[in-house]
Image: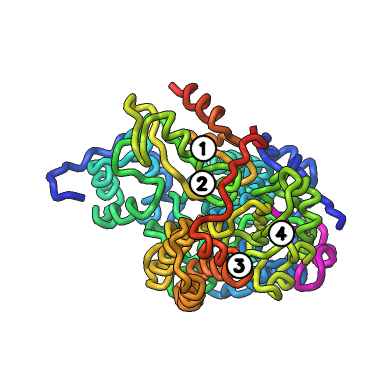
Amino acid sequence: MAAEAILLRRSHGATALQAPVPLEAYRGDGGYEGLEKALSMEPGDVIEEVKASGLRGRGGAGFPAGVKWGFIPKETDQPKYLVCNADESEPGTFKDRLLMETDPHQLIEGCAICCYAVGAHICYIYIRGEYVRQAEILETAIREAYDAGVLGDNVLKSGFKLDMRVHRGAGAYICGEETGMLESLEGKRGQPRVKPPFPAIIGAFGAPTVINNVETLCNVPHVMTRGAQWFSDVGTDERNTGPKLYCISGHVERPGVYEFPIGVTLDELLEAAGGVLGGKALKAFIPGGASAALLGAEHSHLPMDFDSLAKVGSMLGSAAVVVMDETTCLVRAVQRLAKFFAHESCGQCTPCREGTNWSQLVLGRIERGEGRPEDPDLLLRMTANMSGTALCALADACVGPVRSLVQNFRPEIEEHLAAGRCPHPYRPVFEETA
Amino acid sequence: MPETEVAAAELPEEVAGAIDELRRHYPTAEALLLPALHFAQKHWGGWLPEEAILAVAAELDLAPAKVLGVVTFYDLFHQSPIGRHRVRVCTNLSCALRGGQEILESVKRHLGVGENEVSADGRCSVAEFECLGACEQAPMMMVDDEYHPRLTPQSAAEILEGLD
């Protein structure tokens, strides 16, 4: 599959650790032309262009971005807001960090186009608290944009006014959930809200609000400059359009962020990333972040798009691929994820608060060799009671890996139960990483 | 917070000034709480003593209990002193697959501390941390605000030795 760099065209290589592209270089490379074009159009036409592109949200849920923008009421006396979700906190996911630290103006331009389209005059980029340097990079780029007249009272001399702020979180995965993020932005504990009402109607500070992920917004300038048709031609079909950033980590030779049209297979991605670490065989992989169901090596040829992965019970999610080789204990791997979700549950909803912790406890005892014969079915019953029973998707996020472990890799659990110990001793890989 | 008579400290001028500068960008004072706590924590040496929490509450006209509720919710706010350097080792899945747990254990052994403890010389506090968003650099840790990628127990020890 051809892989023209679009989102990463100014980011050199699959990993970051490079100086961010300054405004002058960004403009020299065609940057802010998408914003200029948008400002020459009616806001409603910008929304229609984004709808026509088929761009779906890159934060995990895959909701069409233009449709979301279209939900913002046009006639209202209230202010409108854009909140950019830069609270990337899902294990395996680091693409937004790369976008922000290498090419911050691409994000600022996407935010500005969105604000113009929906009539928002304030944009908050809510960034996870741990991304200290990335917040500083964004703040520097935003200052550059103000100084150049790209932001402020008269955006590119169009008369459109836009204020943009970086707002730092303080270390809570749940704030990546859109209503938890709004609560946090408002200065509260980041506990998700009951929906409806949806943020498009009652969002930040009680006003209509668009919430989009960093990668989603980074796509928007390209939709504007190259057109909806070009964008929708990239991808596997009309429901899976545009370029996509795939993070790959774990047991892989060259972990990093790789750009492909949506629908790349794991085999192709692994080839780009140098294959499984140390030439070992692939045992399992997570195709879409920590909340996606684990798949076995037999699915490595599947297109990793929204629909193909859903058909096999998993999901594209944040397209964060975690690779596990033949030596990996999958019980231990999933227990680590369940521990994460237990730690990050906000505690509002009982099925999530109790279920995430119970999951990690049961998996922990299986891993220690103290599992009970009924444990696999217990895990299935627990996850059935967690699914769809909480205010937000965190409980379901835990269900993804836990249930798939039982459904797709039950023999591995049975092996633990039969042996009374873990059959896969831990093998650190320092020799490869030294 | 225990029921003790703790007077609210005056917010230092630079903290109050930074909060004031933000006011025009937010429609409510409460929205300034996270930025204010970040400013205050930096001023108070990396943690939030009671007087700092009370001072922020007073500045934003919020109930201290409300501020405390927020402080306790978020991992990056601390209610007890930390070391001069904050060491956070990621042990989540991508790092775990490449030895993150062993890095944590070796760091703790090297500094002679347990989880969330401060080393005897006050230099470092160590914490196991959930995903730090640098999975391609696994196993990794953050020391203060800096990433340290692709660690081995030896390289982690060398980094710690290089701290003041």
| Residue B62 point in image, percent of width and height | 27, 55
Asked if one can make out residue A109 in the rendered structure from this viewpoint, the answer is no
Per the image, is B102 magenta?
A: no
Residue labelled with disc 4: A220
| Residue A44 point in image, percent of width and height | 69, 71
Residue labelled with disc 2: B91
Q: Are marks 3 and 2 on the same chain?
A: no
Q: How crowded is mark 1: few (under 14 residues within 10 Å), some or many (20 or more)?
A: many
> In 3D space, how far apart are the residues under numbered discs 1 and 4 (Cα atoms)?
40 Å
Contact, CB < 8 Å: mark 4 with mark 3? no
Q: Magenta segment, which residues?
A: A226-247
| Residue A384 point in image, percent of width and height | 50, 78
Q: Is residue A277 left or right of residue A414?
A: right
Q: Are marks 1 and 2 on the same chain?
A: yes
Q: How crowded is mark 4: few (under 14 residues within 10 Å), some or many (20 or more)?
A: many
Q: In this view, does A356 lie to the left or right of A300?
A: left
Residue labelled with disc 1: B103
Callout 3: chain: A
